[in-house]
Structures are given as structure tokens and as C-alpha cells.
Image (cartoon, helix red, strand yellow):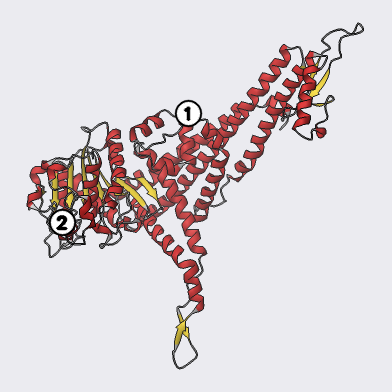
Amino acid sequence: MDYATLKALKPSEFTEAADGYQSVSAMADHAYGSAEGRITARLRSGLSGAAVNEALVQLRGLAQNFHYTQVECGLAATSLNALAASFTEAKRKLDAAVSDAEAQKFSVGADGSVSYPPGGTEKDGKLPDGGTVTGSAKGKPSGNVIDPTKDANDLSGALERQAANIHPNPNFGKAVEIANRIAQAVAEATEADTQWAPRLRKLKADDDLTVSDSDWADVQADTGEVRAGAKDYLDHIKPPPPKGSDPKANADWWKGLSPDEQSAYLSLNGAQVGAMDGLPSVVRDEANRTVLAEKHGEFQLRLNAIPPQPQKYVPSGRDYPAVVLNPAWSEWDKKYAKDKEFLDKNLKGMNAIQDRFNATGKEGLPEAYLLGFDTGGGGRAIVANGNPDTADHTAVFVPGTYTDITKSGDYIHHMSELWKETHAKAPGQDVSTITWIGYDAPQSIVPEAMKKHYAETAAPDLNRFMQGLENLQGGDEKSHTTIIGHSYGSTVLGAASNAGDLRADDMIAVGSPGMLVEHAKDLDAGEGHVWSQAASTLDDQVPLGGKVAGLGGPTDWWEDMLPFGTVWGSNVPSDEAFGANIMANDADSHTDYWRDHSLSIENQANVVAGRYDKVQRG
């Protein structure tokens, strides 16, 4: 990059190239959705057999190619737009400096030097001579006037600037100022070129049609590189993302961005965008699917790098003891066991989410939307069957104790079955059922599930999610919304109701240990719209345990200090005194309320579909 190159440069050529990559990215995104969702659903709806199964495998591979293309082309587009923005600013500064030189009747040489004419006060009948100066990006004149190698410190620079001010030819100081501006513009363009050229060269795919874990790990690395380079570009996007977590503010911010700006945030900050309540479900799904693919690639490579576990016990070589603990196993356990457990757990959850994507069209299942994903803590996974933004009937499921990302498969299956049952009861209407693993649940019955602070910590997140759904749907009258809490998940519902306005028309407590209120009328849905399912105490002891723990009603601060088991007798939803609508069920255990085609799930579906008269009472 030099003066002549910058003078001739057209930043629009880079933005046009970015537009081309963005068009390819958008095309690939559409094709990805078709291959993984719409075409798959059509195949499954009318055909069966080995050929169809093989076609579905091939479609999944094709879908991954389109997904990879979408993401990498999006990165290329964002990189080119960021580079163009830097070049545009540098070119603007250069053009302004050249324009000022022309206005002063100065000339700019091919190397960016500035020549100025004689001027000032005549001495001995002659004007002070003109000359040529070459600018410095540091603001110090050089060339035939000052040697920059002698600029040893700021003092010398100050002296040079003073010399420019007292030069007998007033054109000298003006030429120096313009020459420095030209040098600064060239320096900024050089920095941008140096920064982005290697990043753009890295955005290359390998020469096969298999999108491997290594490819996705490479995408994650590329994203980090581009994000670091595009920081200034993102900082100049106004307004910046809201600092709070208000869903409406998030939605307004997103709507205010241009398509290029939205693409930049999706490309570089997918995890942030995917976690923002209030954004359209298609946007969150796009962001989270990319994060899921990248994390799966990273975690699988990390797992593959862990050496095989040595044999735990080895022969001692003596009569007694016959075997001893293997030192190699002890070293492996210390170095790798914890990381392997973490990786195994998260990969199991990720595979379960992908399995749901692959099941689109199976038994009529609609497309799935990944509305939240994170590997921090116990992990997060928010998965919707059908688009909740346009649903006539929406159900949100909040699971309970022992919930983490490894349970994703079970809970996604629960909501898939509920979708099928509800869809059958609401012909001609759109249904969405959502699995909300959005909090760190208790991981033990005693003492964790006996405490309410897990629910109180989760409550604000649940409220924001529900508020975001309502805003996207167009208000509380646009979709009939049911929220379902299983076990400690119902305690989370109660805490969310206590903490604010829980946006739900109906609430179902299943196997509930208590909802932190004494009566159904104390909940946001109101007494007539709170429902309870609980098997007999012999089959499900959790409601009784909740009464012992005191989760069935408000407790004063001093009650938290009492010994375990002394707070007794508070109402839980399955108690008649609580005031909920008691629904019949055929569960034979605490985890059996979503058995396929069961009475339990049929009754839940009647509530979700708003068919209250069809609910069988208990």
C-alpha cells in the first residue's frame, strides 16, 4: 500500500465483493434449511424404505455442506466489509488532504510528497524559496526539510513543529500539515491491508465434500481471527447492543441494524445473538446452530486427543496382593478424567439436539429451532418444535432436579410427543412446544432440591424468555401460551410468578414439590388456569417431599434456619386446598408423565390446545 495505490483504490469494489459472498451465504442458508428440513419432511411424509433412508443420510451431508458454506461466506463478507470500511476512511482522509493541497495551489507528487511555491515577505527583492516536503504518519515533516532518523524524542519533534511555525515561507507549514495527513492516510490503509490480507487468505475450505469436526473447529478459529480484526468495525455500528437484557430493547436494536450489520453480528458474535431474548426465532436458531456445530467440532477434537484410559489394576507380581493400582491409570485419571467427563456430557447433549434436527418430518414433526445453547455450568439447550413466533398455541416445558444438557434427548422427546398430541387436537392451527433447559437445576434431592434459591435464581431468565416470546408473537392475545413445570421446574414457575409477570395463560405443575405460594390464585395465570398432575404417593413421592421441605408456600426468613423437616404442612399443587384444576394421569413414576399416547400427555395437550372441556379431571 502506497500513495498511488490508495489514490486509485475503489473501496466499493470490496463492498461489492462482500455483497457477492453475502448472497452466496444467504443462498446456502436457504438451501441448508431446505435440505435439513423441508425436503426431508416431504420425503418422510410419502415414502419409506432403504432408498429413502439412504437419501436422508445424503441430505444431511448436503445440509452440512450448505451450513458450512453459509458460515464461511458470511465471515468472508464481514471481513471484506470491515476492510472496505477501513479503506473508505483512509481514502476519505487522503482525498480531503489532496483537495486542500489543490486549493492552496500546491502539487502532490506520485510518492505523496507536497510541493509548495515561494511565498512570504520579500528579502533582498526575493520571496523565500518554495520546496517539497514528505509527510510522516507521526505528524513530523521529513524529506528534503527534516530527516526523520534524527527524531530521537518528543523534544525534537516539538522543535520541528516550532520550526515549521517560524519558517519564513508560510506555505511551508501548510504543506507540512497536508503531507502529514497524506502519510497518515497511507499508514492507516497499510495497517488495514496488513491486518486483513492474511485473515482473508485463511478463509479457504479443504478440497473434499465432508464437513468434519476439524472443519468446524477451523471455522471457530476463523471466527475468532475475524472478530479480533473487526472490533473497530463493530464498535462503529450504532447503536451498540443493549447493555441490559430487556427483550423489547433487544428486538428494537436488531430491527435498527442494516442487513450487513445484522450479518456481521451473526457471523462474529453468534453466541451473543443466540442468547438474546426478543430476537426472532429464525435469527437465534441460525446463530445457535453455528455455535453448536463449532463447539461440537472443538469438543470432539479435544476428546479424540485424550489418550485411552489405562487398565486400572495391574498384577503385583506377588502372591498378596495379587493386583495393585496402576500408577499410569492414576496419572491418567488426574490429568484427563475430569475433562473427559465434561466433554462426554456436552457431546451427548449436542448429539441429542442434532438428532432432533434430523427427525424433522418424522411422524409429522415440524422444523426445530435452537433458541439457546451454551456449555457453561450444567449446559443450556432451548429447543422448539415449530416456530413459536407464529404459533397459535405455545407450550414451554421447564424440567426439574438433575437437569443438565445430558438430559436434552429425554426432554426434547417429551415436547415432541406433546407437539404431536396437541397438533392433532388443533387442526389448522400452528403449534410450538419448547424445551427450556435455561437454568442450573439442583443436582441432588438433599439438600439442593430442598432449597428455593435455585428457583429464584432461574426466575428472571424464565421471565425474560417468556416476555420475548410474547413480544415476538405480537402481544398476549396472539398466542395461547401454556407453561409446564415438572418437579422442581414447577418451583421455578412459582418463583418466576413471584418475581414478576410470568407471561402465560395456563400453568401446569407436574409432580410438583411446591410453587412457593399457598394457593393457585396467588399465581399470575389465576386460579382457573392453574393445573396439576401428580401420581399417587406410592408412585411419586416428590409432592410429599416438597411439603416436608416447605416449598409449598412462602416461608419467612427465620424458617430457613430451622432444621430439615420442621416446616411441614404447606400446600402443594396436588392438594385440594391449593385450588388447582386436578387432572387425571396414568403415570406410574415421577418421570412417567410423558409416556407416548398416555392419558397424562393427552390431558396436557388438551390444556395446551385450549380444549379445557376435554380435560379428564382427577
Residue 403: give x, y in percent of width and height. 30, 57
Q: Secondary structure at mark 1?
A: loop
Residue 191: give x, y in percent of width and height. 66, 35
Q: Residue furthest top?
A: 125
Q: Secondary structure at mark 2?
A: loop
> Are discs 1 and 2 less than 8 Å apart at CB?
no
- Total numbered labels: 2
Q: Is residue 602 above or below residue 592?
A: above
Residue 189: give x, y in percent of width and height. 66, 31
Residue 408: give x, y in percent of width and height. 32, 55
Name which residue lies at 36% across and 46% down: 372
Find disc 2 in the rendering and name its residue: 598
Find disc 1 in the rendering and name its residue: 238
Q: Is residue 169 above or below residue 64?
A: above
Name which residue lies at 56% across and 29% down: 16
Spatial separation of the CA atoms under disc 1 and disc 2: 53 Å
Name which residue lies at 64% across and 35% down: 192
Whichever of callouts 1 and 2 sits on the residue coming sooner in the sequence is 1
Which of discs 1 and 2 lies nearer the camera? The answer is 1
Q: Is residue 48 above or below residue 136?
A: below
